[in-house]
Amino acid sequence: SSSELVDKGVQFEMDMSQRNYDDDSDEFEDCEELPDPDTLISPWMRPFDELRALMQPIGEHIFKRIMRHGHEERDPVPDKARVSIRYSGYWEGVGAPFDSSLLRGTKFEFETGTKMVLEGLEAAVRTMRPYEQSEFIISYKLLFRELGCPPRIKPKADGLFKVEVIDYTMIGDGQAMDSICQEDRDKFYVVYPKAQDLHLHGKDCVRRSRFRCAATAFERALESLNYCRLANEEEERQQTALLLTLSVRICIYIMGLFIVISIISQQNLMVCYNKLGRPRRVCIVMKDVRRLTANDPPCKALFHEARALTSLGEYQQARKILMKAQAKQPANKEINDEIELLDKRINRYEEASRDLWSKALWGTRPKAQSPPVAETNNDSSKEAKEKKFRQEMEDLIEQFEKSERPSMSLNRKVYSNAEVELFSEMVKDHNMKIMYSPINEDRITLSKKGDK
């Protein structure tokens, strides 16, 4: 009914995933590669009634067909869990999705039991195990109800969903202790399950780099357990085990908080020094960042180190650092634009150097009167440049081969037509292919042929 729709409303989705190290800046956002357009086409273009006949009912309003079984040793997605999924939703007879996490280039995360997503989508996901891929037909009664949202969503519109569960983790309850009445706060059998909930909540905070919240949850659990009266040796054993776990985690994550804050501070210091025109100080700070991250600095630090090196005239080293940053985040526009600008600067520098040497050796004579050795030098320069490009691309291909990623995106504007053609030939030797995006002509995708 319309009153029910007004009361319950529609739950819109937002990616709540946290970023590491870059809490203070939106410069660098993690994202996945854009999908192959074929994967976005609806898997069923005939009437939904025909597909329902091939599916299993899992309730009055949901039908399911498993396309890839999940890990049998793992339970289906439970309540109070943070689950990561990829999904696409389709209307009956429509080939293009009305919504898809693939179009946003990122997995979608939500917490079960919190009404963060459509009722039908959560109910479907709750039947799945990690790694499972399934298709669902979900009744309009669990989606957008009788009215829909014309013209985009028709009234009483059932939906077809393709869903893949990547994984889930238990999130516990950060407010678990608040539900215990005052007279029960010293009873172990009441407090212990709530302390376990707080422990799970703290672990979830750590996964999202929220170390302060994690430490608070662990400390509350410790305090509550210490206040309890124990009835027997078994309760004492359980209390001791959980107290030990919580104490160790507090020590570890307070140190983790210190390290993350140190890295963020060092990165912000690099930004300031670059803006103040003090590139040497940026390079000194970067040494501390490399030490704190075991020589695996985040993209933001690499980016600002490259800018500092560019200011110091160390163009080749700056480009090498930017290529490392691009390998971490291939779709990052700011990194790709910086590489493009640096390549133009390198070309201008090399041309100026050639002109300078030409004038030094041959005076002011026109280039046409220069001895043939000048052309030889130009040829040698082109060969050296091509050799260097080959080596950079071989390193990129090797790194991509070792990774588990099925594809990676590159900025087309960074490379000349000749370089793209050469790169296309090189990847064939590694059983890879290059695809051109129909959505963005400046993007090319390198993918492994064995993966779809």
Image (tube, helix red, strand yellow):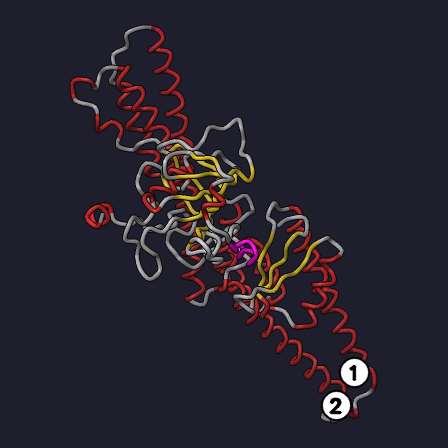
Element type at marker 2? helix
Neighbours of disc 1 within 10 Å: few (<14), some (14-19), many (20+): some
Query: Looking at this view, is 246 or 411 the one in front?
Result: 411
Q: Is residue 169 visible?
A: no
User: Sequence order check: which comes first, mark 1 or mark 2?
Assistant: 2
Residue 35 in picture, x, y percent from top left: 54, 55
Numbered tag placed on residue 367 in the rendering: 2
Q: In the rendered structure, which segment of residues is drawn in magenta?
A: 33-42
Whether the magenta-drawn stretch holds residue 320 is answered as: no
Query: Looking at this view, is 375 or 357 the one in front?
Result: 375
Q: On the image, numbered disc 1 is attached to which residue?
A: 374
Element type at marker 1? helix
Residue drawn at (38%, 48%) of the image: 158
Q: Is residue 168 visible?
A: yes
- Residue contact at pointers 1 and 2, CB within 8 angstroms: yes
Q: Which amino acid, mark 2? A: Lys
Numbered tag placed on residue 171 in the rendering: none
Residue 413 in picture, x, y percent from top left: 58, 70
Residue drawn at (76%, 78%) of the image: 378
Q: Is residue 115 above or below residue 249?
A: below
In terms of secondary structure, what is the magenta stretch mainly? Answer: loop
Is 93 displayed left or right of 449 in the figure? Answer: left
Q: Which amino acid, mark 1? A: Ala
Residue 444 in picture, x, y percent from top left: 60, 63
Residue 81 in picture, x, y percent from top left: 38, 34
Whether the magenta-drawn stretch holds residue 38 is answered as: yes
